[in-house]
């Protein structure tokens, strides 16, 4: 009898352990571990003295055959967007979007640049936009666009490590509406529209839009001037950092995600490969209420939402003989490069050129001065 009890007790204990193990397995199966960021490209060489921007003096950077590292931003320190010789901010706002770009929404902290879309708290803006070369309607939201001052970047490899925003904080799987970017764009599009994009959008955490545009003498987007394609990303673009890149050459554009080639465009496909220099830009914006691009579930959006940039790198193609100008100066820029390319009222650049045969409109002198004083005031 005692032996039977012992056997039954042992059997019960073994059964309990089996049930516990099964429960643990069940929990393990249903609760996926937290996703880790993709690995950064392996570095092999330090940035030399000729590398512009703000490279890390002790960091090793990857090398790519046929390309030379020319510009690095680590975002380890704040960049003065009014006085920096390479970078500034946009005062624009897309007509189809809900955001006005302002300097205040671009912040540098903890080794990263953060661009935040939020409800407008009453930040001072002028009616006329230097970047848009025209008036911008009142927008309910503000965000930021970090951009190069001049159209002086062309053939090369462009890399960024970034994390797209969460539509709802704490849940990267909820879809909504946003467009989180790194791209090259030629100002002003009224003359020559050239653009190459990486766009992470709010419609899925697992896809990225690659895009190229090329057109002359138009400021109206259409499918006839663009060739966009969605590509898959391993992992969640909102939960972790990923490395996005494209190599722009005279006869091809190749996009990469975490070192993996995801798309190549050749001259055989329309539109043509862009052939003119442009500005490097990074921004975050929200489409209008129709949610025509960037994700249909715009009703899920909760503000503020932020895009984070860990670093940016530009490698000049060794076959490029003109851009960027020596020392990142303006010495190589043509009149066409400088056509209507002012960025904001505080960049110290003259708005050169005519818009449809007329001088671009400007805000009243007192409005311009008040805004400029506000922008330059200490934070």
Image (cartoon, rainbow, N blue to C red):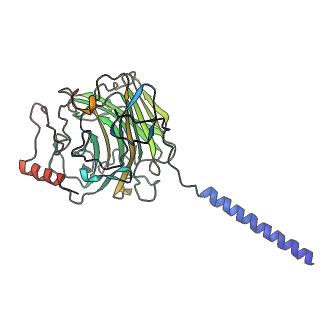
Q: State the residue in front, 165 or 247.
A: 247
The spot of residue 45 in percent (x, y) is 45, 34
Depicted 23 relative to depicted 360: above or below: below
Left or right: residue 333 versus residue 223 is left
The spot of residue 353 in percent (x, y) is 13, 31
Q: State the residue in front, 258 or 58.
A: 58
The spot of residue 375 in percent (x, y) is 18, 52
Left or right: residue 158 versus residue 12 is left
**Residue 275 occupies quadrant:** top left
- Identified at 37% across, 44% down, the residue is 74
Depicted 118 relative to depicted 63: above or below: below
Left or right: residue 374 versus residue 172 is left
* Residue 83 visible in the snapshot: yes
Depicted 99 relative to depicted 216: above or below: below
- Identified at 32% across, 31% down, the residue is 213
Image quadrant containing the N terminus: bottom right
The spot of residue 160 in percent (x, y) is 40, 40
Left or right: residue 168 versus residue 186 is right
- Identified at 71% across, 62% down, the residue is 21
Image quadrant containing the C terminus: bottom left
* Residue 295 visible in the snapshot: no
- The count of marks equals 0
């Amino acid at each position: 009898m005692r032996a039977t009890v012992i056997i039954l007790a042992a059997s019960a204990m073994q059964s309990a352990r089996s049930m516990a193990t099964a429960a643990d397995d069940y929990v393990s199966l249903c609760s996926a571990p937290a996703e880790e960021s993709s690995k950064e490209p392996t570095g092999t060489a330090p940035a030399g003295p000729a590398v512009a921007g703000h490279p890390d003096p002790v960091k090793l950077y990857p090398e790519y055959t046929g390309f030379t590292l020319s510009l690095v931003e680590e975002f380890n320190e704040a960049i003065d967007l009014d006085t920096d010789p390479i970078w500034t901010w946009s005062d624009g706002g897309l007509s189809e979007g809900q955001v006005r770009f302002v300097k205040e929404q671009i912040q540098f902290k903890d080794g990263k640049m953060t661009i935040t879309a939020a409800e407008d708290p009453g930040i001072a803006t002028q009616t006329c936009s230097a970047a848009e070369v025209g008036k911008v309607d009142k927008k309910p939201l503000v965000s930021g666009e970090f951009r190069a001052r001049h159209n002086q970047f062309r053939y090369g490899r462009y890399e960024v490590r970034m994390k797209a925003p969460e539509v709802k904080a704490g849940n990267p799987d909820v879809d909504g509406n946003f467009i989180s970017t790194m791209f090259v764009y030629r100002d002003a599009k009224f003359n020559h529209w050239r653009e190459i994009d990486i766009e992470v959008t709010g419609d899925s955490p697992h896809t990225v839009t690659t895009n190229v545009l090329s057109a002359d003498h138009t400021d109206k987007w259409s499918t006839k001037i663009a060739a966009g394609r969605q590509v898959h990303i391993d992992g969640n673009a909102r939960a972790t950092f990923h490395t996005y890149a494209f190599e722009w050459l005279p006869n091809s554009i190749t996009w990469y995600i975490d070192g993996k080639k995801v798309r190549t465009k050749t001259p055989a496909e329309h539109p043509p490969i862009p052939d003119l220099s442009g500005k490097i830009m990074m921004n975050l914006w929200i489409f209008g209420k129709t949610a025509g691009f960037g994700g249909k579930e715009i009703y899920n959006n909760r503000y503020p939402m932020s895009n984070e940039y860990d670093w940016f790198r530009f490698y000049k193609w060794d076959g490029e003989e003109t851009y960027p100008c020596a020392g990142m100066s303006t010495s190589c820029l043509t009149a066409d490069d400088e056509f209507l390319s002012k960025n904001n009222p505080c960049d110290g650049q003259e708005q050169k050129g005519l818009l449809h045969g007329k001088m671009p409109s400007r805000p009243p002198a007192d409005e311009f001065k008040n805004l400029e004083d506000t922008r330059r005031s200490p934070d």
